[in-house]
Amino acid sequence: MAARRTWLLIGVTAVAVAGSIATYDTTPGNILYVATYLALCAIAWHAVARMEPGPQRLPWALIATSQTLWLTGDVIELVYYYRSSVPPVGVADACWLAGYPLLAVALTLMARHRAPGRLRSAVLDGLTLTVAAGLASWQFLILPNLATGLSLAETIIPPLYPIADVVLLAGVLFIALSPGDRGTPTRLLLGAVVLYLSVDIGYNVLPYVVDYGLVERIGPLLILGNALVIGACLHPQRAELTRAGAEVDLLHPSRVLFLGLALLTAPTLALVENGLTDKAVAALIATALSTGFVLMRFTTAVREQEKAQAELAFRARHDPLTGLANRAVLTTEMERARSGPVAVLYLDLDGFKQINDGYGHHAGDLVLATVADRLSTAVRATDLVVRLGGDEFVLFCPNLPEDEAVRLAERVLADVAQPIPFRGELLDVGVSVGIAAYRHLDGADVLRSADMAMYEAKRLGRGRWVMAG
C-alpha cells in the first residue's frame, strides 16, 4: 500500500507539473507551482518527523532542507515579480545555491551508510568523473560568463550554478558507484538528481538553440524531481539507501567506459581549443589507444580480484559442504522481514548419528548434501534453506500461511525419508520438524519456538512435525 502511495504522489505531481508548464508565467500557473512545491515540502518534513532519531534520518532532513531553500528562493523571486521587477541576482540566488551542497552532503552520507569501509573505489571513480565534468563546465559554461563584462555580482553568481552542479554530480556519483542494493528507492533518488542536473544544464545550453521564453518553461520539472526524492523517502524499502548493503562492489563495463572518457576529456578539450591540426589529432588517437589498453589491463586485474572477493564472501555466508546459507544469512533475512508474516521450520535429522558412526563421515556428508538438495527442491524460490550446523536445518518462509507451512512440513517428511544409495546399500534417515508461524516476526523468539517444537516432535516419536503453541 505504501508503494502505491509513492507512485500516486509522483503521478499527481507529474500532472501538476504539466499544468505549471502549460500555464507558465501566469498567476494561475504561479499559484499552482507554489502550492505543489509547498505541499511536497510539507510531505517531506512530515516523513522526516516520523523517522526514528539517528544518523539514518540526517540525510533525509538535509534533503528536505534543500528543497525548502529552493522553494524559498522561488517565493522570493515571485514577490519581486509582482511588487517591482526581478533583479539579475539577489537573495533568491543565495537560497537556490545553498540547497546544492546540502543535497550533495545527503547523498554522500547515504553512500557512507550503504558501504561502510568500502567506499574508496566509488569515491576515486566519482572524483575522476567529477574532475572531467568540472573541466568541461569550466571551458563551456563558466569562462563564457566571466567574459560578459557585467557587474561583479552578475559576473560571479551565474558561474556558481555550474560549480554547484559539479558538487551535486560528485554526490550522486558516490551513491551510484557505491555497492549496495539497487531497488526502487535508489532508482528514484538517482533519477531525481539526474533530472535536477538536466534542468540546470538545459538552462545554460538550450538558450543557444531555442528562444529563452521556451527554456524558462522547463523550470517546473524541478518539482517532479522533488516528487521522486520524496517518493524514495516514503517508499517502504527506503532503508536500502541508509543501511549497509550486501552487494559486492563489481566493476560494471559502463564504469570503465566512463572512466576512459574522463581520462580523454583534457586532451579533447585542448584539441578543441587549439584547433584540429593533423599532429594534434594523431596525438589524441594515440592517447585514446593507450588509455584503452591501460583500462583493459586494469579491468582484467580488477575482475580477478572481484572473483576472489566473491568467493570469500560466499564462504562467509554459506555452508561449505551443502552450499546452503548459514546462520549469518538467516539473521539478516529475519531482520529484513520484521513487517510481515513468516513461517519457520526447524529440522533435525533422525538416525543421522547411527549412519555417521556405522558408515563413516563420507556417508554422513552424502546424507547432508542429499537432504540439502531435497529441501531446496521442496521450498519456493522466495524461501531460504539454512544449515545451522551438524544435522540441523531451518526453512525460513516469508508470507507463508500456517496451513501451507504444515503442508510443506509433510512434504519435507516424505522427501527426506526416501532412501539414499551409498556403495550398493540404501541409507535410511528421517527428520523431526518444529513449526513456528507468526504474523509479526521477532527473530530470536520465533527460532527458539520452532526449536522447542522440534524437540517435542522427537519426544513424541520422531518422523513427525509439531506446531509451536
Image: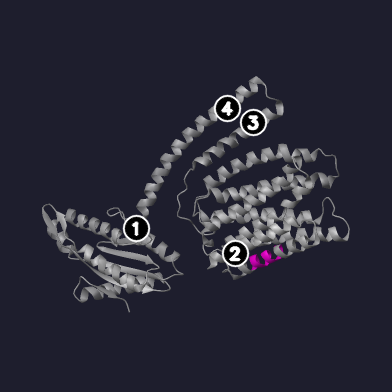
Instruction: Give SS at disc 4.
Output: helix
- Amino acid type, mark 1: Ala
* Mark toward the start of the polypeptide (3 vs 4): 3
* First of labels 1, 2 by sequence position: 2
Q: Earlier in the sequence, mark 4 or mark 1?
A: 4
Which residue, given by chain and number where applicable, does mark 4 sit on?
A: 287
Majority secondary structure in the magenta region? helix
The Cα atoms of the two marked residues, 1 and 2, are separated by 38 Å
**Residue in front for this viewpoint, 321 or 193:** 193
Label 3 vs label 2: CA separation? 45 Å
Residue 268 disc label:
3
Q: Seen in the image, is 9 located left or right of residue 325?
A: right
Q: Secondary structure at mark 2?
A: helix
The quadrant of the rendering that contains the C terminus is bottom left
Q: Quick check: is 44 in the magenta stretch?
A: yes
Q: Residue at x 62, y 47 (%)?
A: 170
Foreground pick, 248 / 413: 413
Q: Secondary structure at mark 3?
A: helix
Q: Tags 1 and 2 in contact by the CB under 8 Å rule?
A: no
Q: Nearer the viewer, mark 1 or mark 2?
A: 2
Residue, disc 1: 325
Tell me the CA gap for discs 1 and 3: 50 Å
Q: Which-is-in-front pick, marks 4 and 2?
A: 2
Q: CA distance from mark 3 to mark 4?
A: 10 Å
Q: Which residue reaches farthest right?
A: 84
The circle on residue 142 is: none
The magenta span reads 37-45
Query: Which residue was labeled with disc 2?
Result: 8
Q: CA distance from mark 4 to mark 1?
A: 48 Å
| Mark found first going from the N terminus, 1 or 3 | 3
Which is more N-terminal, label 2 or label 3?
2
Residue type highlighted by circle 3:
Thr
